[in-house]
Image (tube, grey):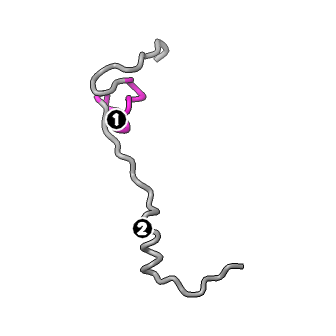
């Protein structure tokens, strides 16, 4: 079984784990008021930068 030869200090452990955090996604509000990711078509209304990109279904 592999065992470390020396103790890893708290500082070195913290430096190694500095990049392990989870990034919080950026959320913007669409013109319809729904939150959506930037640079993507709004899933609720189907618009992107003020233009209609997806057709709305008749069932909605």
Q: Residues under labels 1 and 2: Cα distance?
A: 28 Å
Taking 22 as reference, is 39 above or below it? Answer: above
Main SS category, magenta section: loop
The span picked out in magenta is 31-46
Q: Nearer the viewer, residue 6 or 38?
A: 6
- Seen in the picture, residue 7 relative to 58 is either above or below; the reply is below
Q: Which residue is mark 2?
A: 18
Q: Quadrant of residue 38?
A: top left
Of residues 23 and 6, the one drawn nearer to the viewer in this rendering:
6
Which residue has dot 1 on it?
Answer: 39
Left or right position of 53 against 50:
right
Residue depicted at x 37% and y 33%: 40
Quadrant where the N terminus is found in the figure: bottom right
Residue at 54% in and 86% down = 7
Tell me residue 37's x, y (percent).
37, 38
Which structural element holds mark 1?
loop
Residue 35 forms part of the magenta stretch: yes
Residue found at the very far top of the displayed protein: 58
- Given residues 41 and 30, the one toward you in this image is 41
Q: How many callouts does the rendering have?
A: 2
Q: Residue at x 37, y 36 (%)?
A: 36
Q: Tell me the residue at 41%/27% (across/down).
A: 44
Task: Determine crowd level at label 2: few under 14, some 14-19, many 20+ residues with C-alpha closer than 10 A.
Answer: few
Measuring from the top left, give residue 60's x and y in whole percent: 46, 18
Q: Does the segment drawn in magenta span residue 47?
A: no
Mark 1 or mark 2: whose residue is earlier in sequence: 2
| Left or right: 54 as drawn, with respect to 50 | right
Residue 8 versus residue 32 in the image, above or below: below
Residue 26 falls in which quadrant of the image? top left
């Amino acid at each position: 079984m592999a065992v470390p030869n020396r103790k890893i200090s708290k500082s070195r452990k913290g430096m190694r784990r500095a990049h392990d955090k989870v990034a919080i996604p950026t959320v913007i509000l669409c013109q319809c008021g729904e939150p959506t990711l930037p640079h993507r078509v709004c899933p609720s209304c189907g618009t992107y930068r003020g233009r209609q990109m997806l057709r709305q279904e008749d069932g909605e």
